Amino acid sequence: MSHAPVEKSLWRHGDFVRYWSACAVDIAGSGVTTVALPLIAVVSLHASVWEVSLLSFAERLPPLIVALPAGALADRHRKRPLMIGAVLVCGAAFAAVPLADATGCLSLELLYAVALVTSASSLIGSTPRISYLPSLLPRERLLEANAKIGVVASLADSAGAQLGGAIVALLGAARAVYLDVTSYLACALLLGSIRTPEPVPDRLARKGSMRAEIADGIRFVLRHPTIRPLLMTGTAFTAVFAFLTTLWGVYLLRELHYTAGTLGTLLSMAALGGVVGALAVHRLVDRYGPTRVMLTALAIIPFTELPLLLAAPGLAGQVAIAAGLFVQLACSTMQGSTQRSIRQAVCTPGMQGRMLATGQWITYGTRPLAALLAGASGTWLGLWNTLALGTLALALPFLVLFASSVRTLRHVPVVPPAPGPPHVEGEPV
């Protein structure tokens, strides 16, 4: 396995640039469907609040089912073939939406099925993609690399959301999904062009059953003094955020009467906040330490929901919501990038996939339950009251992290990888 020298710019690391570009293309395409799918459900298929929550449930259910096996697969096999296969499956599934619309067969049931398939495939692909980064770069470059990926992710998300709003207005929501299909094909080509030899998983590690490997990963995460509290914080944040985002689109479209273009603009402005957060996080962590950065970001996030609760229809409300979402995504990106870098740095190479998958299983496993709870609460209590409850609950992640032992962490740890056989692609095991 070859790494770029520490002093070398990551922009001169050709394979990192290909990896970075693949992430950008994937996220830009997904930004289009982030705008298009809710519009198809709410506007084209006249879905109720409960039916919209079921769509959100379908998108968020797969982590409970496939996250743990995905982690074991990522540690058992080479990661690039898994990444490429997953994005191709996603592209094929999303292609069914505009095809069904063209033939008059578009339905909520089809959207539920597409949401399930694409969410499961994305998880199977993202687990090896994220855990692949420590084998592509030295561990002391992970925070820098994650920050650069965060910048392009936010820019691509912003461009995708803005482009999604424009394309939906021009072509219709269903046909706009074709752009996401194209992005998956481009992502597969970029990932396939990476040339750095990928380490072959340890042959001895593949002798046990998958169930035993999954159990090892769960024990590793739950017993780790640094990863466990970070995982608890991420679980609290993800659950509350999933609760809120289930109803955002419905509230903006029905209560504030926003158009598709306005919705795309708001989402793109929020994503630009992620760019600022990604650009700032490296210097802020170097200066103030990771714990202060994460705690400050989590303390600010609840206040960023207030413009959504207080805004009225019209331009002033749109500007206020955009500003709140901008700050919210900046803070979310800073705390998320910092957490991810710490977990990658302290995890041994043979556990990277299972560590990530166990975290996704626990953290993202709360999202389908949060979506159903949001749908029930929105139906019984009303959209505004439900969003207000979710805003109050955003204080939980801060309290969880503040009460943990991680609050004493002053810098991102750099743990040397465990020694192992230097197997690479093309060499016999």
Image: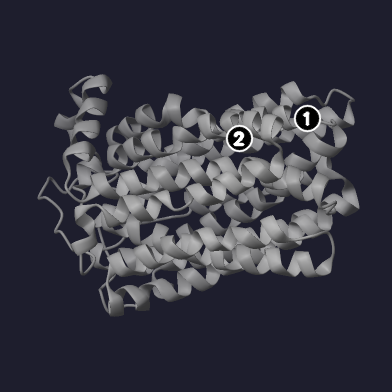
Q: Quadrant of the C terminus?
A: top left
Residue at image position (25%, 63%) is 138
Q: Quadrant of residue 70?
A: top left
Q: Is residue 89 left or right of residue 63?
A: right
Seen in the picture, residue 379 relative to 260 is either above or below; the reply is above
Residue 82: percent from left, percent from top? 43, 37
Reading the image, the residue beneath label 2 is 374
Q: Which mark is residue 94?
A: none
Q: Residue furthest left?
A: 419
Seen in the picture, residue 317 relative to 134 is either above or below; the reply is below
Residue at image position (39%, 69%) is 13
Q: Is residue 2 left or right of residue 261?
A: left
Residue 102: percent from left, percent from top? 88, 31
Q: Is residue 256 left or right of residue 238?
A: right
Reading the image, the residue beneath label 1 is 48
Dot 1 or dot 2: first in sequence order is 1
Residue at image position (72%, 27%) is 51
Q: Is residue 216 left or right of residue 125?
A: left
Residue at image position (21%, 41%) is 350
Q: Quadrant of residue 398?
A: bottom left
Of residues 429 and 421, which is closer to you in this image? 421
Of residues 217 and 304, which is closer to you in this image? 304
Type of the residue with mark 1:
Ser
Q: Quadrant of the N terminus?
A: bottom left
Q: Is residue 181 visible?
A: no
How many angstroms separate mark 1 from mark 2 (CA)?
13 Å
* Mark 1–mark 2 CB contact (< 8 Å): no
Residue 156: percent from left, percent from top? 61, 61
Q: Residues within 10 Å of mark 1 (few under 14, many from 20)?
A: some
Q: Residues within 10 Å of mark 2 (few under 14, many from 20)?
A: many
